[in-house]
Image (cartoon, rainbow, N blue to C red):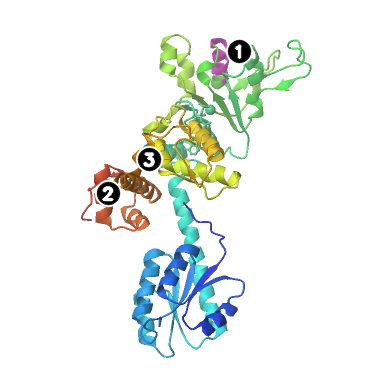
Amino acid sequence: MAEPSARKRTLLVVEDDLGLQRQIKWCFDGYEVVTADNREAALAAVRRHEPQVVLQDLGLPPDPAGVAEGLASLQQILGLAPFTKVVVMTGNGDRDNAVKAIANGAWDFYQKPVDSEVLRLIVERAFHVAELEAETRQKREAGGVQPIEGIIAVSHEMTQLCRKIEKVAPADVSVLVLGESGTGKELLARALHLLSPRRAKRFVAINCAAIPENLLESELFGYEKGAFTGAVKTTPGKVETAEGGTLFLDEIGDMAPALQAKLLRFLQERVIERVGGRQEIPVDVRVVCATNQDLQVLIEQGRFRADLYYRIGEVTLKVPALRERRACIPVIAQHLLRRFAEQNRRPRLTFGLDALQVLENHEWPGNVRELENRVKTAVIMSDGPFISAEDLGLGASGEPGRWLNLREVRSRAEQVALRQALALAEGNISRAADLLGVTRPTLYDLMEKFGVDSPLAGGERVRAGADKNA
Ligand SMILES: Nc1ncnc2c1ncn2[C@@H]1O[C@H](COP(=O)(O)OP(=O)(O)OP(=O)(O)O)[C@@H](O)[C@H]1O
Ligand SMILES: [Mg+2]
Protein backbone atom coordinates (compact mmCIF):
# COMPACT_ATOMS: atom_id res chain seq x y z
CA MET A 1 0.00 0.00 0.00
CA ALA A 2 2.39 2.65 1.22
CA GLU A 3 5.55 3.18 -0.73
CA PRO A 4 8.78 3.03 1.19
CA SER A 5 9.98 6.57 1.87
CA ALA A 6 13.70 5.86 1.66
CA ARG A 7 13.63 4.60 -1.92
CA LYS A 8 16.60 5.03 -4.18
CA ARG A 9 16.38 8.20 -6.24
CA THR A 10 15.45 7.26 -9.79
CA LEU A 11 15.65 9.86 -12.53
CA LEU A 12 14.26 9.31 -15.99
CA VAL A 13 15.89 11.36 -18.72
CA VAL A 14 13.81 11.69 -21.88
CA GLU A 15 16.03 13.16 -24.58
CA ASP A 16 16.43 12.23 -28.24
CA ASP A 17 19.88 13.75 -28.61
CA LEU A 18 22.02 10.83 -27.47
CA GLY A 19 25.09 12.99 -26.88
CA LEU A 20 23.11 15.25 -24.59
CA GLN A 21 21.56 12.21 -22.94
CA ARG A 22 25.03 10.95 -22.02
CA GLN A 23 26.12 14.36 -20.80
CA ILE A 24 23.09 14.60 -18.50
CA LYS A 25 23.70 11.11 -17.22
CA TRP A 26 27.17 12.19 -16.08
CA CYS A 27 25.66 15.06 -14.11
CA PHE A 28 23.65 12.61 -12.03
CA ASP A 29 26.28 10.26 -10.84
CA GLY A 30 24.90 8.71 -7.64
CA TYR A 31 21.32 8.63 -8.89
CA GLU A 32 19.72 5.73 -10.64
CA VAL A 33 19.41 7.21 -14.12
CA VAL A 34 17.27 5.59 -16.79
CA THR A 35 16.95 7.02 -20.28
CA ALA A 36 14.42 7.12 -23.10
CA ASP A 37 14.55 8.85 -26.47
CA ASN A 38 10.86 9.00 -27.36
CA ARG A 39 7.41 9.13 -25.81
CA GLU A 40 6.68 5.44 -25.93
CA ALA A 41 9.99 4.49 -24.36
CA ALA A 42 9.43 7.17 -21.72
CA LEU A 43 6.04 5.75 -20.74
CA ALA A 44 7.44 2.24 -20.59
CA ALA A 45 10.25 3.47 -18.34
CA VAL A 46 7.78 5.24 -16.04
CA ARG A 47 5.79 2.03 -15.65
CA ARG A 48 8.84 -0.06 -15.10
CA HIS A 49 11.08 2.12 -12.91
CA GLU A 50 8.58 4.49 -11.27
CA PRO A 51 11.04 7.40 -11.26
CA GLN A 52 10.29 10.14 -8.73
CA VAL A 53 11.59 12.76 -11.17
CA VAL A 54 11.55 12.96 -14.96
CA LEU A 55 13.75 15.31 -16.93
CA GLN A 56 12.12 15.63 -20.31
CA ASP A 57 13.04 17.39 -23.52
CA LEU A 58 10.03 19.22 -24.90
CA GLY A 59 11.12 18.62 -28.50
CA LEU A 60 10.72 14.90 -29.11
CA PRO A 61 10.57 12.86 -32.32
CA PRO A 62 8.72 12.68 -34.63
CA ASP A 63 8.39 16.45 -34.04
CA PRO A 64 11.77 17.45 -32.55
CA ALA A 65 11.36 21.06 -33.65
CA GLY A 66 7.87 21.47 -32.14
CA VAL A 67 6.48 20.83 -28.70
CA ALA A 68 3.30 18.84 -29.43
CA GLU A 69 4.90 15.47 -28.87
CA GLY A 70 6.69 16.69 -25.75
CA LEU A 71 3.49 18.05 -24.23
CA ALA A 72 1.63 14.83 -25.04
CA SER A 73 4.38 12.85 -23.36
CA LEU A 74 4.22 15.11 -20.31
CA GLN A 75 0.48 14.62 -20.00
CA GLN A 76 0.67 10.88 -20.36
CA ILE A 77 3.45 10.56 -17.82
CA LEU A 78 1.38 12.51 -15.31
CA GLY A 79 -1.70 10.49 -16.16
CA LEU A 80 0.23 7.34 -15.40
CA ALA A 81 2.09 8.58 -12.34
CA PRO A 82 0.47 11.77 -11.07
CA PHE A 83 2.96 12.28 -8.24
CA THR A 84 5.97 12.33 -10.55
CA LYS A 85 7.85 15.63 -10.76
CA VAL A 86 8.49 16.39 -14.41
CA VAL A 87 11.12 18.99 -15.27
CA VAL A 88 10.93 19.99 -18.93
CA MET A 89 13.88 21.16 -20.98
CA THR A 90 13.23 23.75 -23.62
CA GLY A 91 15.34 25.44 -26.26
CA ASN A 92 17.18 28.58 -25.31
CA GLY A 93 14.79 31.49 -24.80
CA ASP A 94 11.68 29.40 -25.38
CA ARG A 95 9.81 30.82 -22.42
CA ASP A 96 6.36 30.54 -23.96
CA ASN A 97 6.56 26.82 -24.28
CA ALA A 98 8.08 26.47 -20.85
CA VAL A 99 5.04 28.25 -19.45
CA LYS A 100 2.77 26.04 -21.53
CA ALA A 101 4.46 22.98 -20.06
CA ILE A 102 3.99 24.28 -16.51
CA ALA A 103 0.34 24.90 -17.29
CA ASN A 104 0.16 21.26 -18.35
CA GLY A 105 1.47 20.01 -15.04
CA ALA A 106 5.26 20.18 -15.41
CA TRP A 107 6.83 20.88 -12.06
CA ASP A 108 9.65 23.10 -13.32
CA PHE A 109 11.53 23.93 -16.51
CA TYR A 110 15.09 24.29 -17.60
CA GLN A 111 16.44 26.11 -20.61
CA LYS A 112 19.22 24.64 -22.66
CA PRO A 113 22.20 24.68 -22.99
CA VAL A 114 22.93 22.39 -20.11
CA ASP A 115 24.67 23.91 -17.14
CA SER A 116 25.26 20.88 -14.96
CA GLU A 117 25.39 22.88 -11.72
CA VAL A 118 22.00 24.54 -12.23
CA LEU A 119 20.38 21.42 -13.62
CA ARG A 120 21.51 19.41 -10.62
CA LEU A 121 20.02 21.98 -8.27
CA ILE A 122 16.66 21.94 -10.03
CA VAL A 123 16.49 18.17 -10.13
CA GLU A 124 17.70 17.85 -6.55
CA ARG A 125 14.91 20.12 -5.40
CA ALA A 126 12.35 18.13 -7.35
CA PHE A 127 13.49 14.93 -5.63
CA HIS A 128 13.35 16.58 -2.27
CA VAL A 129 9.75 17.68 -2.75
CA ALA A 130 8.76 14.32 -4.26
CA GLU A 131 10.16 12.53 -1.22
CA LEU A 132 8.44 14.81 1.25
CA GLU A 133 5.14 14.31 -0.52
CA ALA A 134 5.61 10.55 -0.64
CA GLU A 135 6.28 10.52 3.07
CA THR A 136 3.14 12.49 3.80
CA ARG A 137 1.08 10.21 1.60
CA GLN A 138 2.54 7.20 3.30
CA LYS A 139 1.72 8.54 6.74
CA ARG A 140 -1.80 9.41 5.71
CA GLU A 141 -2.40 6.01 4.19
CA ALA A 142 -0.88 4.21 7.13
CA GLY A 143 -2.96 6.32 9.48
CA GLY A 144 -6.10 5.64 7.49
CA VAL A 145 -5.86 1.90 7.62
CA GLN A 146 -4.15 1.71 10.99
CA PRO A 147 -5.83 4.32 13.18
CA ILE A 148 -3.87 2.76 16.03
CA GLU A 149 -0.47 1.37 15.21
CA GLY A 150 -0.64 -2.32 14.41
CA ILE A 151 -4.43 -2.43 14.28
CA ILE A 152 -5.87 -2.55 10.79
CA ALA A 153 -9.33 -1.09 10.72
CA VAL A 154 -11.17 -0.39 7.49
CA SER A 155 -14.79 -1.10 8.27
CA HIS A 156 -16.99 1.45 9.96
CA GLU A 157 -17.35 -0.74 13.06
CA MET A 158 -13.62 -1.15 13.52
CA THR A 159 -12.70 2.48 13.00
CA GLN A 160 -15.38 3.43 15.54
CA LEU A 161 -13.95 0.90 17.95
CA CYS A 162 -10.49 2.38 17.53
CA ARG A 163 -11.85 5.83 18.32
CA LYS A 164 -13.46 4.47 21.46
CA ILE A 165 -10.17 2.91 22.48
CA GLU A 166 -8.36 6.20 22.03
CA LYS A 167 -10.90 7.88 24.27
CA VAL A 168 -11.02 5.22 26.95
CA ALA A 169 -7.29 4.46 27.10
CA PRO A 170 -6.15 7.51 29.11
CA ALA A 171 -8.96 7.15 31.68
CA ASP A 172 -8.23 4.82 34.55
CA VAL A 173 -11.41 2.79 34.14
CA SER A 174 -11.54 -0.99 33.99
CA VAL A 175 -12.29 -2.28 30.51
CA LEU A 176 -13.94 -5.51 29.46
CA VAL A 177 -13.15 -6.61 25.90
CA LEU A 178 -15.68 -9.02 24.42
CA GLY A 179 -15.39 -10.91 21.17
CA GLU A 180 -15.01 -14.26 19.53
CA SER A 181 -11.74 -16.10 19.62
CA GLY A 182 -9.09 -14.55 17.37
CA THR A 183 -10.82 -11.22 16.83
CA GLY A 184 -7.93 -9.22 18.30
CA LYS A 185 -8.97 -8.80 21.94
CA GLU A 186 -5.42 -8.99 23.25
CA LEU A 187 -4.19 -6.65 20.55
CA LEU A 188 -6.79 -4.08 21.64
CA ALA A 189 -5.98 -4.61 25.32
CA ARG A 190 -2.34 -3.82 24.53
CA ALA A 191 -3.43 -0.73 22.61
CA LEU A 192 -5.33 0.44 25.71
CA HIS A 193 -2.10 0.13 27.65
CA LEU A 194 0.11 1.79 25.03
CA LEU A 195 -2.23 4.75 24.69
CA SER A 196 -2.45 5.27 28.45
CA PRO A 197 -0.16 7.20 30.81
CA ARG A 198 0.87 3.79 32.12
CA ARG A 199 2.66 2.87 28.91
CA ALA A 200 6.15 3.09 30.43
CA LYS A 201 5.22 0.46 33.01
CA ARG A 202 4.43 -3.20 32.38
CA PHE A 203 1.55 -4.84 30.57
CA VAL A 204 1.13 -8.13 32.41
CA ALA A 205 -1.12 -10.73 30.80
CA ILE A 206 -2.50 -13.78 32.49
CA ASN A 207 -4.68 -16.40 30.88
CA CYS A 208 -7.20 -17.51 33.48
CA ALA A 209 -8.18 -20.57 31.44
CA ALA A 210 -4.65 -21.87 31.01
CA ILE A 211 -3.72 -22.10 34.69
CA PRO A 212 -5.21 -24.77 36.99
CA GLU A 213 -7.59 -23.34 39.54
CA ASN A 214 -5.43 -24.18 42.53
CA LEU A 215 -2.39 -22.43 41.03
CA LEU A 216 -4.13 -19.35 39.72
CA GLU A 217 -4.41 -17.66 43.10
CA SER A 218 -0.68 -17.83 43.82
CA GLU A 219 0.04 -16.88 40.22
CA LEU A 220 -2.12 -13.79 40.57
CA PHE A 221 -1.38 -12.70 44.11
CA GLY A 222 1.99 -14.34 44.83
CA TYR A 223 2.93 -16.37 47.88
CA GLU A 224 5.07 -16.25 51.01
CA LYS A 225 7.90 -18.63 51.63
CA GLY A 226 6.55 -21.83 53.18
CA ALA A 227 2.92 -21.09 52.25
CA PHE A 228 2.68 -24.54 50.68
CA THR A 229 4.97 -27.38 49.71
CA GLY A 230 7.41 -26.08 47.14
CA ALA A 231 7.06 -22.44 48.16
CA VAL A 232 10.79 -22.10 48.82
CA LYS A 233 10.95 -18.34 48.58
CA THR A 234 8.53 -15.45 48.73
CA THR A 235 7.31 -14.69 45.22
CA PRO A 236 5.26 -11.70 44.05
CA GLY A 237 2.24 -12.42 41.86
CA LYS A 238 1.27 -11.02 38.49
CA VAL A 239 -0.84 -8.29 40.06
CA GLU A 240 2.15 -6.94 41.96
CA THR A 241 4.51 -7.14 39.00
CA ALA A 242 2.07 -5.00 37.03
CA GLU A 243 2.45 -2.15 39.57
CA GLY A 244 1.92 1.17 37.82
CA GLY A 245 0.97 -0.62 34.59
CA THR A 246 -1.86 -2.71 33.18
CA LEU A 247 -3.05 -6.14 34.27
CA PHE A 248 -4.70 -8.10 31.47
CA LEU A 249 -6.93 -10.95 32.64
CA ASP A 250 -7.66 -13.03 29.57
CA GLU A 251 -10.52 -15.56 29.50
CA ILE A 252 -11.97 -14.05 32.64
CA GLY A 253 -15.14 -16.12 32.10
CA ASP A 254 -13.16 -19.22 33.04
CA MET A 255 -12.18 -17.98 36.47
CA ALA A 256 -13.40 -20.19 39.33
CA PRO A 257 -15.99 -18.67 41.70
CA ALA A 258 -13.71 -18.68 44.76
CA LEU A 259 -11.09 -16.70 42.91
CA GLN A 260 -13.71 -14.36 41.48
CA ALA A 261 -14.46 -13.33 45.06
CA LYS A 262 -10.79 -12.62 45.73
CA LEU A 263 -10.43 -10.65 42.53
CA LEU A 264 -13.52 -8.63 43.41
CA ARG A 265 -12.03 -7.83 46.81
CA PHE A 266 -8.83 -6.65 45.15
CA LEU A 267 -10.75 -4.45 42.74
CA GLN A 268 -12.68 -2.88 45.62
CA GLU A 269 -9.83 -2.42 48.10
CA ARG A 270 -6.86 -2.20 45.73
CA VAL A 271 -4.75 -4.21 48.11
CA ILE A 272 -3.57 -7.79 47.78
CA GLU A 273 -2.49 -10.45 50.23
CA ARG A 274 0.00 -13.04 49.09
CA VAL A 275 -0.93 -16.67 49.68
CA GLY A 276 0.24 -17.51 53.19
CA GLY A 277 0.82 -13.86 53.96
CA ARG A 278 -0.80 -11.51 56.45
CA GLN A 279 0.29 -8.21 55.13
CA GLU A 280 -1.89 -6.11 52.86
CA ILE A 281 0.07 -4.72 49.95
CA PRO A 282 -1.41 -1.79 48.03
CA VAL A 283 -1.15 -2.15 44.25
CA ASP A 284 -1.95 0.41 41.57
CA VAL A 285 -2.90 -1.30 38.33
CA ARG A 286 -5.36 -0.72 35.53
CA VAL A 287 -7.37 -3.86 34.91
CA VAL A 288 -8.40 -4.96 31.44
CA CYS A 289 -10.30 -8.23 31.05
CA ALA A 290 -11.29 -10.23 27.99
CA THR A 291 -13.48 -13.19 27.23
CA ASN A 292 -15.09 -14.93 24.29
CA GLN A 293 -17.88 -16.22 26.52
CA ASP A 294 -21.25 -14.66 27.08
CA LEU A 295 -20.93 -13.40 30.64
CA GLN A 296 -24.65 -12.67 30.90
CA VAL A 297 -25.38 -16.33 30.35
CA LEU A 298 -22.70 -17.34 32.86
CA ILE A 299 -24.27 -14.97 35.39
CA GLU A 300 -27.70 -16.49 34.83
CA GLN A 301 -26.20 -19.93 35.31
CA GLY A 302 -24.58 -18.78 38.54
CA ARG A 303 -21.09 -19.30 37.19
CA PHE A 304 -20.02 -15.68 37.13
CA ARG A 305 -20.56 -13.06 39.79
CA ALA A 306 -22.71 -10.16 38.70
CA ASP A 307 -20.91 -7.77 41.07
CA LEU A 308 -17.56 -8.71 39.54
CA TYR A 309 -19.03 -8.22 36.08
CA TYR A 310 -19.90 -4.61 36.87
CA ARG A 311 -16.47 -4.00 38.45
CA ILE A 312 -14.44 -5.28 35.50
CA GLY A 313 -16.67 -3.76 32.89
CA GLU A 314 -16.82 -0.07 33.74
CA VAL A 315 -16.43 0.20 29.99
CA THR A 316 -17.25 -2.69 27.67
CA LEU A 317 -15.83 -2.96 24.17
CA LYS A 318 -17.27 -5.43 21.71
CA VAL A 319 -14.93 -6.56 18.95
CA PRO A 320 -16.84 -7.60 15.84
CA ALA A 321 -16.17 -10.98 14.25
CA LEU A 322 -14.17 -10.81 11.04
CA ARG A 323 -17.20 -11.84 8.94
CA GLU A 324 -19.01 -8.80 10.35
CA ARG A 325 -16.32 -6.49 8.93
CA ARG A 326 -15.63 -7.91 5.52
CA ALA A 327 -14.09 -4.68 4.28
CA CYS A 328 -11.17 -5.36 6.62
CA ILE A 329 -10.46 -8.82 5.20
CA PRO A 330 -8.51 -7.98 2.02
CA VAL A 331 -6.54 -5.24 3.75
CA ILE A 332 -5.52 -7.38 6.73
CA ALA A 333 -4.78 -10.22 4.31
CA GLN A 334 -2.50 -8.02 2.19
CA HIS A 335 -0.77 -6.75 5.31
CA LEU A 336 -0.14 -10.28 6.55
CA LEU A 337 0.96 -11.43 3.12
CA ARG A 338 3.55 -8.71 2.90
CA ARG A 339 4.88 -9.60 6.33
CA PHE A 340 5.12 -13.35 5.78
CA ALA A 341 6.29 -13.06 2.17
CA GLU A 342 9.15 -10.85 3.28
CA GLN A 343 10.05 -13.23 6.09
CA ASN A 344 10.17 -16.01 3.52
CA ARG A 345 12.13 -13.90 1.04
CA ARG A 346 9.37 -13.95 -1.54
CA PRO A 347 8.49 -10.23 -1.60
CA ARG A 348 6.72 -10.42 -4.97
CA LEU A 349 4.16 -13.00 -3.96
CA THR A 350 0.55 -11.84 -4.46
CA PHE A 351 -2.94 -13.25 -4.09
CA GLY A 352 -4.44 -14.80 -7.18
CA LEU A 353 -7.96 -13.90 -8.18
CA ASP A 354 -9.46 -17.13 -6.82
CA ALA A 355 -7.68 -16.53 -3.50
CA LEU A 356 -9.10 -13.02 -3.17
CA GLN A 357 -12.50 -14.42 -3.90
CA VAL A 358 -12.42 -17.12 -1.22
CA LEU A 359 -10.92 -14.70 1.28
CA GLU A 360 -13.99 -12.54 0.82
CA ASN A 361 -16.47 -15.39 0.95
CA HIS A 362 -15.10 -17.52 3.76
CA GLU A 363 -16.91 -17.34 7.10
CA TRP A 364 -13.73 -17.05 9.21
CA PRO A 365 -14.86 -18.87 12.36
CA GLY A 366 -11.33 -18.41 13.75
CA ASN A 367 -11.34 -14.72 12.79
CA VAL A 368 -8.05 -12.82 12.31
CA ARG A 369 -6.02 -15.59 13.88
CA GLU A 370 -7.36 -18.03 11.28
CA LEU A 371 -6.60 -15.54 8.52
CA GLU A 372 -3.08 -15.19 9.90
CA ASN A 373 -2.56 -18.95 9.94
CA ARG A 374 -3.96 -19.48 6.47
CA VAL A 375 -1.84 -16.75 4.91
CA LYS A 376 1.25 -17.99 6.72
CA THR A 377 0.70 -21.52 5.40
CA ALA A 378 -0.15 -20.29 1.91
CA VAL A 379 3.13 -18.38 1.65
CA ILE A 380 4.96 -21.62 2.34
CA MET A 381 2.75 -23.80 0.11
CA SER A 382 2.52 -21.61 -2.99
CA ASP A 383 4.72 -22.41 -5.97
CA GLY A 384 4.34 -19.62 -8.49
CA PRO A 385 4.00 -15.87 -8.05
CA PHE A 386 0.33 -16.20 -7.05
CA ILE A 387 -1.28 -17.61 -3.94
CA SER A 388 -4.26 -19.77 -4.89
CA ALA A 389 -7.41 -20.61 -2.97
CA GLU A 390 -5.98 -24.07 -2.53
CA ASP A 391 -2.78 -22.68 -0.97
CA LEU A 392 -5.05 -21.02 1.58
CA GLY A 393 -6.59 -24.39 2.30
CA LEU A 394 -9.95 -23.13 1.13
CA GLY A 395 -10.20 -25.00 -2.15
CA ALA A 396 -11.24 -23.33 -5.36
CA SER A 397 -14.78 -22.03 -5.25
CA GLY A 398 -16.11 -23.97 -8.22
CA GLU A 399 -14.68 -26.05 -11.00
CA PRO A 400 -11.37 -24.98 -12.56
CA GLY A 401 -12.86 -24.07 -15.95
CA ARG A 402 -15.00 -21.46 -14.27
CA TRP A 403 -12.16 -18.95 -14.21
CA LEU A 404 -11.82 -19.04 -17.95
CA ASN A 405 -14.90 -16.92 -18.49
CA LEU A 406 -13.26 -13.60 -19.23
CA ARG A 407 -16.26 -11.46 -18.41
CA GLU A 408 -16.60 -13.04 -14.99
CA VAL A 409 -12.89 -12.84 -14.28
CA ARG A 410 -12.95 -9.18 -15.20
CA SER A 411 -15.96 -8.48 -13.08
CA ARG A 412 -14.43 -10.17 -10.05
CA ALA A 413 -11.13 -8.37 -10.51
CA GLU A 414 -13.01 -5.08 -10.78
CA GLN A 415 -14.85 -5.78 -7.59
CA VAL A 416 -11.70 -6.63 -5.67
CA ALA A 417 -9.86 -3.57 -6.99
CA LEU A 418 -12.86 -1.38 -6.17
CA ARG A 419 -13.05 -2.54 -2.56
CA GLN A 420 -9.33 -2.14 -2.06
CA ALA A 421 -9.22 1.32 -3.59
CA LEU A 422 -12.10 2.49 -1.39
CA ALA A 423 -10.42 1.05 1.65
CA LEU A 424 -7.09 2.67 0.85
CA ALA A 425 -8.73 5.99 0.09
CA GLU A 426 -10.57 5.88 3.42
CA GLY A 427 -13.80 6.32 1.56
CA ASN A 428 -12.59 9.42 -0.26
CA ILE A 429 -14.32 8.99 -3.60
CA SER A 430 -12.05 11.24 -5.64
CA ARG A 431 -8.97 9.57 -4.33
CA ALA A 432 -10.36 6.09 -4.89
CA ALA A 433 -11.20 7.12 -8.45
CA ASP A 434 -7.64 8.39 -8.87
CA LEU A 435 -6.22 5.16 -7.54
CA LEU A 436 -8.23 3.18 -10.05
CA GLY A 437 -7.60 5.60 -12.87
CA VAL A 438 -11.33 6.16 -13.50
CA THR A 439 -13.62 9.15 -13.22
CA ARG A 440 -15.89 9.67 -10.24
CA PRO A 441 -19.09 8.83 -12.18
CA THR A 442 -17.48 5.58 -13.34
CA LEU A 443 -16.56 4.80 -9.77
CA TYR A 444 -20.13 5.40 -8.62
CA ASP A 445 -21.41 3.16 -11.38
CA LEU A 446 -19.07 0.42 -10.22
CA MET A 447 -20.16 0.85 -6.61
CA GLU A 448 -23.77 0.61 -7.63
CA LYS A 449 -23.14 -2.36 -9.89
CA PHE A 450 -21.47 -4.34 -7.13
CA GLY A 451 -23.57 -2.95 -4.28
CA VAL A 452 -20.47 -1.71 -2.51
CA ASP A 453 -20.64 0.83 0.29
CA SER A 454 -17.70 3.11 0.81
CA PRO A 455 -16.06 2.54 4.17
CA LEU A 456 -15.89 5.41 6.60
CA ALA A 457 -15.57 8.86 5.09
CA GLY A 458 -15.17 11.63 7.65
CA GLY A 459 -17.24 9.74 10.19
CA GLU A 460 -20.10 9.13 7.84
CA ARG A 461 -20.95 6.32 5.57
CA VAL A 462 -21.09 7.16 1.91
CA ARG A 463 -23.58 5.16 -0.08
CA ALA A 464 -23.28 4.57 -3.75
CA GLY A 465 -24.92 7.42 -5.56
CA ALA A 466 -25.28 9.58 -2.47
CA ASP A 467 -23.33 12.54 -3.87
CA LYS A 468 -23.27 11.63 -7.45
CA ASN A 469 -23.50 15.16 -8.61
CA ALA A 470 -21.31 16.65 -5.92
N1 LIG B 1 -7.28 -5.53 13.35
C1 LIG B 1 -6.15 -6.24 13.31
N2 LIG B 1 -5.11 -5.82 12.57
C2 LIG B 1 -3.98 -6.54 12.52
N3 LIG B 1 -3.77 -7.67 13.17
C3 LIG B 1 -4.76 -8.15 13.94
C4 LIG B 1 -5.99 -7.45 14.04
N4 LIG B 1 -6.78 -8.15 14.88
C5 LIG B 1 -6.08 -9.22 15.27
N5 LIG B 1 -4.86 -9.24 14.72
C6 LIG B 1 -3.84 -10.28 14.91
O1 LIG B 1 -4.53 -11.52 14.98
C7 LIG B 1 -3.99 -12.36 15.99
C8 LIG B 1 -5.08 -12.70 17.00
O2 LIG B 1 -5.35 -11.55 17.78
P1 LIG B 1 -5.52 -11.64 19.37
O3 LIG B 1 -4.57 -12.62 19.96
O4 LIG B 1 -5.47 -10.26 19.89
O5 LIG B 1 -6.99 -12.19 19.40
P2 LIG B 1 -7.85 -12.68 20.65
O6 LIG B 1 -9.20 -12.12 20.44
O7 LIG B 1 -7.14 -12.36 21.92
O8 LIG B 1 -7.88 -14.22 20.38
P3 LIG B 1 -8.13 -15.43 21.42
O9 LIG B 1 -9.53 -15.36 21.82
O10 LIG B 1 -7.82 -16.60 20.54
O11 LIG B 1 -7.16 -15.23 22.52
C9 LIG B 1 -2.83 -11.61 16.58
O12 LIG B 1 -1.64 -12.03 15.97
C10 LIG B 1 -3.13 -10.18 16.24
O13 LIG B 1 -1.95 -9.42 16.14
MG1 LIG C 1 -6.41 -13.72 23.37
Residue depicted at x 41% and y 35%: 396
Going from N to C along the chain, the mark reached first, 1 or 2, is: 1
Pick the residue in front: 342 or 321. Answer: 342
Does the image show residue 448?
yes
**Secondary element at image label 3:** loop
Q: Residue furthest left?
A: 469
Check disc 2 and report the residue beneath it: 446
How much space separates mark 1 and mark 2, taking CA atoms? 56 Å
Instruction: Answer above or below: position of 86 versus 291.
Output: below
Q: Residue furthest top?
A: 302
Check disc 1 and report the residue beneath it: 213
**Secondary element at image label 2:** helix
Amino acid marked by disc 2: Leu
Residue 409 image position (x, y, % from top left): 34, 45
Q: Main secondary structure of the magenta part?
A: helix
Of tags 3 and 2, the one toward the viewer is 2
Does the image show residue 459?
no
Amino acid marked by disc 3: Ala
Q: Residue furthest bottom?
A: 93
**Secondary element at image label 1:** helix
